[in-house]
Image: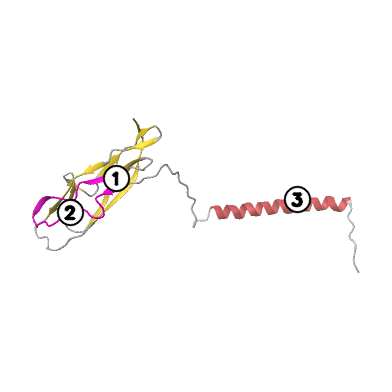
């Protein structure tokens, strides 16, 4: 047998108050849970502003070659130098930094324009021509000093460059 439920104005008024209380309780719980999630120490918000793109061609590639050198020699010129940094295609000025040089004798003897290459920095500004960046490529002359006592044989190393934005375009 089916029962019938009768609603009256009195029942609805009481029900509305209870519903409001439940709704307020539900919203408060969601806020509390959301607040706990927002301050979770295992999470971190991130944001970034992309200001441009950096594209740098380095020549010569893939290898800067010094040919045959002897121990206790200084200022050995690269056979395929100079090294040229050309940021054509970038949409911003570029800073080029030599952040690491590995492999003996390069780590202590590689020089750009007469100064140890590691930690050298070269700024190549964007010169605005209308809406386009134009650049003057940066050229450096590489030389290699080979210390006394260097062992004979083929030597290899790696030059690591870091490219960052060089601000403030210059108007042509």
Find out whether the residues at labels 3 and 2 contact each other: C-beta distance under 8 Å: no
Q: Which residue is mark 3?
A: 20
Determine crowd level at label 3: few under 14, some 14-19, many 20+ residues with C-alpha closer than 10 A.
Answer: few
What residue is disc 1 on? 96
- Magenta stretch contains residue 64: yes
Q: Residue at x 41, y 34 (%)?
A: 131
Where does the magenta region start and end? 58-85
Residue 11 pos. (x, y %): 86, 53
Lower position in the chain sequence, tag 1 or tag 3: 3
Image coordinates of residue 140 in percent, x first then y, are: 21, 44
Q: CA distance from mark 3 to mark 2?
A: 76 Å
Question: The N terminus is located in which quarter?
Answer: bottom right
Q: Residue furthest bottom?
A: 1
Q: Name which of mark 3 and mark 2 comes first in the sequence.
A: 3
**Secondary structure predominantly adopted by residues drawn in magenta:** loop
Q: Is residue 117 above or below residue 105?
A: above
User: In the figure, is residue 71 to the left or right of 168?
Assistant: left
Task: Residue under label 2, please give it.
Answer: 108
């Amino acid at each position: 047998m089916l029962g019938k439920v009768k609603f009256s104005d009195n029942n609805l008024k009481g029900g509305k108050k209870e519903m409001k209380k439940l709704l307020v309780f539900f919203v408060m719980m969601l806020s509390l849970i959301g607040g706990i999630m927002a301050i979770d120490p295992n999470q971190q918000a991130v944001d970034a502003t992309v200001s441009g793109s950096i594209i740098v061609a380095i020549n010569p590639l893939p290898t800067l070659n010094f040919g045959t050198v002897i121990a206790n020699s200084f200022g050995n010129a690269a056979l395929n130098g100079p090294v040229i940094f050309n940021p054509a295609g970038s949409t911003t000025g570029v800073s080029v930094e030599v952040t690491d040089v590995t492999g003996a004798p390069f780590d202590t003897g590689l020089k750009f324009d007469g100064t140890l290459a590691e930690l050298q920095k070269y700024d190549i500004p964007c010169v605005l021509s209308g809406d386009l960046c134009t650049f003057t490529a940066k050229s450096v002359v590489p030389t290699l000093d080979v210390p006394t006592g260097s062992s004979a044989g083929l030597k290899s190393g790696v030059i690591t460059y870091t490219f960052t934005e060089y601000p403030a375009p210059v108007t042509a």
